[in-house]
Image: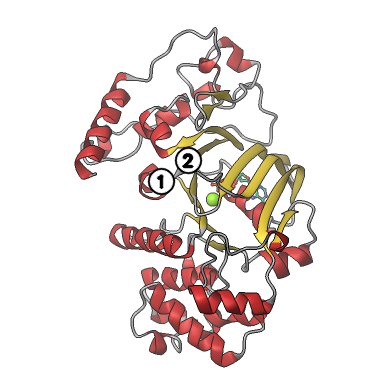
Amino acid sequence: MKEKEEVLKIRGLDIAFTTDNGTVNAVRGVDLDLHRGETIAIVGESGSGKSVTTKAVMGILAGNGKILDGSIDYTYYEFSPERIKEIRDQHDGRIPDGFVREDEKRTVDIVKATPKFIQSEIRGRRIAMVFQDPLTSLDPTMTIGKQVMEAMRYHYKMPKKEAWQRAVHLLELVGITDAEKRMKNYPHQLSGGMRQRVVIAIALSCDPEVLICDEPTTALDVTIQAKILELIKEIQQKKDLSVIYITHDLGVVAKVADYVNVMYAGRIIEKGTVNDIFYDPKHPYTWGLLASMPDMDTSSDELYTIPGTPPNLLYEVQGDAFAPRNQFALHIDEKVAPPMFKVSDTHSAATWLLAPKAPKVEMPAELKERIERMKKEAMING
Ligand SMILES: Nc1ncnc2c1ncn2[C@@H]1O[C@H](COP(=O)(O)OP(=O)(O)O)[C@@H](O)[C@H]1O
Ligand SMILES: [Mg+2]
């Protein structure tokens, strides 16, 4: 099998914010990999650094934020306008395998790129983002049509008529009926679910290679949530997109992701395939997340909640940031932050429990039962 092509390679990313109360070390040494056509998830409680990490990729960190260290290598294809048209005409916007010539491939470190380069070449064009709340990403004073056309007009200087036709096509693609008519509507004339579909259409308008979805369904009700997830999955397969899915909801992760990155207090503390993380989790924080995930067999008042709160990143973290909340913490956790220990080729976790000399600690029995149940259900549901 051919080695999968790496699209994003983040190494040692450190991001801090300057505030009146001091420096917030929001992201601390993050490594992340995304390959072509793959979906990765970033999960973790609110405030763990999920959004900040991906905002750095998009070049949209808040003004008081700064990347202190690390690299974000992005590999993309540089096509002439004629080539783009050729691809679009022949393949419905998809870039089929083997279609790209070596001389059309580029790698850029987004940390070192100029804001102008990111704006004109990357953001909204090659890497697009869908945010949690469609209302904040849509302009209430502009028609849907105009908003879907805008990025294509800007990035590809597309003539109005062509952009209009393509916008209608995009609205149809994301499942909006009466697309021609909807083009003339304003955001408030659409339901929340429909608005989020519009945001997805906008994100797809320039045929991005990477789609970042930051809690895209959190503001929506459960049935609409499922439809939007299904939609993103379908489009991804059609367009060979690489997707980064940010969520605090592990149930969502199980439905969409190939690989999972668990984040805690600005660090990735466990990573692996969906099966690694759901069936063989190693980090006590991941155990806690899995145990607190709602499922069909556990009523919500029986559900586990991880005790305590994440550390305040205004202060330097001593040792393992999760130790104060971790019933399995070892003495060393108070002093030294654990490195990533390799579990398998696809799986690693930053917990001293994986050190060769660590005492043998098993995950809590209830969680073990839960995982056995999940495995059985997965077998039944195929
Ligand atoms: N502009 C900012 N100024 C100060 N702190 C910030 C800013 N943006 C984010 N943070 C802090 O960075 C940390 C990570 O935030 P974020 O990435 O948004 O978390 P989440 O995992 O919920 O997406 C949080 O502690 C948050 O308070
Ligand atoms: Mg967030």
Q: Position of residue 361 (x, y in %)?
A: 42, 13
Per the model, the C-alpha gap separating discs 2 and 1 is 8 Å
CB-based contact (under 8 Å), mark 2 and mark 1: yes
Q: Residue at x 62, y 75 (%)?
A: 84
Q: Position of residue 349 (x, y in %)?
A: 53, 27
Q: Residue at x 54, y 7 (%)?
A: 357
Quarter occupied by residue 192 = bottom left
Residue position marked by numbered label 1 in the rendering: 253
For numbered disc 2, what is the local secondary structure?
strand
Q: Nearer the viewer, residue 154 or 193?
A: 154
Residue 335 lies left or right of residue 261; in this view the side is right
For numbered disc 1, what is the local secondary structure?
helix
Residue position marked by numbered label 2 in the rendering: 260
Q: Residue at x 50, y 54 (%)?
A: 37
Q: Position of residue 318 (x, y in %)?
A: 66, 22
Q: Residue at x 22, y 34 (%)?
A: 376
Quarter of the figure with the C terminus: top left
Q: Position of residue 115 (x, y in %)?
A: 77, 63
Disc number for residue 19? none
Q: Is residue 305 above or below residue 178?
A: above
Can residue 44 be seen by looking at this rendering?
Answer: no
| Type of amino acid at the residue the image marks with label 1 | Val
Residue 25 lies left or right of residue 265; in this view the side is right
